[in-house]
Image (tube, rainbow, N blue to C red):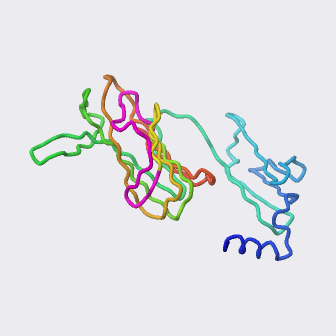
Amino acid sequence: IATVHAVYALLLQGEEMLDTNNDIEIRMGNTTVVSADDVKEPGTGYIKKVWHGKEVKPDFGNIEVSSAKDDFSWGAMHWQYYAPYSEITSAGNGITISRKLFKKEISDQGPELVEINEDAAVKNGDKIVVRMEVTTDRDYSFVHLKDSRTAAFEPVEMNSGYRYNDGAGYYFSVRDASVNYFFDYLPKGSYVFEYELFRVRKGSYTGGLSTIQCVYAPEFNAHSSGE
């Protein structure tokens, strides 16, 4: 109720904040990509532009937004490309995530985790622990964490369901090629999430990738480095 009252108070200030007929102009480098003449989605003013491959110019990194009215506008720009896992470096905006693989070994002192590197020997039947460390710079709502696994591994736990770990509640979902965490609410802080796999196939594989993103604010996202 308090949120509704706050929104109502803002809308009473005499400005047409929800008016979608605002003349927004967006320039990328020397190119005008959005102008007042572009057809927008009725009711929301939403507009989307996509460029592929060689259509992307170096000066597209210089973005200028102007409006003929003193009101609110929201937008985001995303650059997507394909690369081998081994060439991917970690990156994030508001969120950071790192991913490590460990082999679970039994010693005289009990179970021990040995970090897996390029020279580590892993054989069929070995139990592998995937550890993801997540740090958020603010509170987030509706967050999706996805960890892609290599074809050499199968998860120990096959059942999906609601979990609570390290101060965060989430729905844990096992898929054919990934493990997914769905958070309704992820407060500001640092978290460690782990799950276990079995090595079931021989061969040389890439290690997979972890990604995390706000579902309704996709500009807040991060991914781990490739392995």
User: Quick check: 139 left or right of 217?
Assistant: left
Q: Residue 150 placed where, x, y %?
A: 40, 31
Tell me the quadrant of the picture where the C terminus can be found: top left
Question: Magenta segment, which residues?
Answer: 148-170
Looking at the image, which residue is at 69% across and 35% down? 52
Residue 147 x/y as whole percent: 45, 41
Query: Looking at the image, which residue is at 60% across and 50% down?
Result: 215
Direction from residue 111 to residue 56 in the image, left or right: right
Would residue 42 appear left or right of 211 to someone viewing this image? Answer: right
Q: Quadrant of residue 82?
A: top right
Q: Residue farthest to the right? A: 37
Nearest the camera: 142 or 221?
142
Q: How many marks?
A: 0
Q: Which residue is situated farthest in the top direction here? A: 202
The residue lying furthest to the left in this view is: 108
**Which residue is located at x 71 percent, y 74 percent?**
6
Magenta stretch containing residue 74, yes or no? no
- Can residue 162 be found in the magenta stretch? yes
**Please, is residue 135 above or below residue 9 in the view?**
above
Whole-percent x, y for residue 1 in the image: 67, 72
| In front of the other: 106 or 206 | 106
Q: Position of residue 198 (x, y in %)?
A: 30, 33
The image quarter containing residue 141 is bottom right
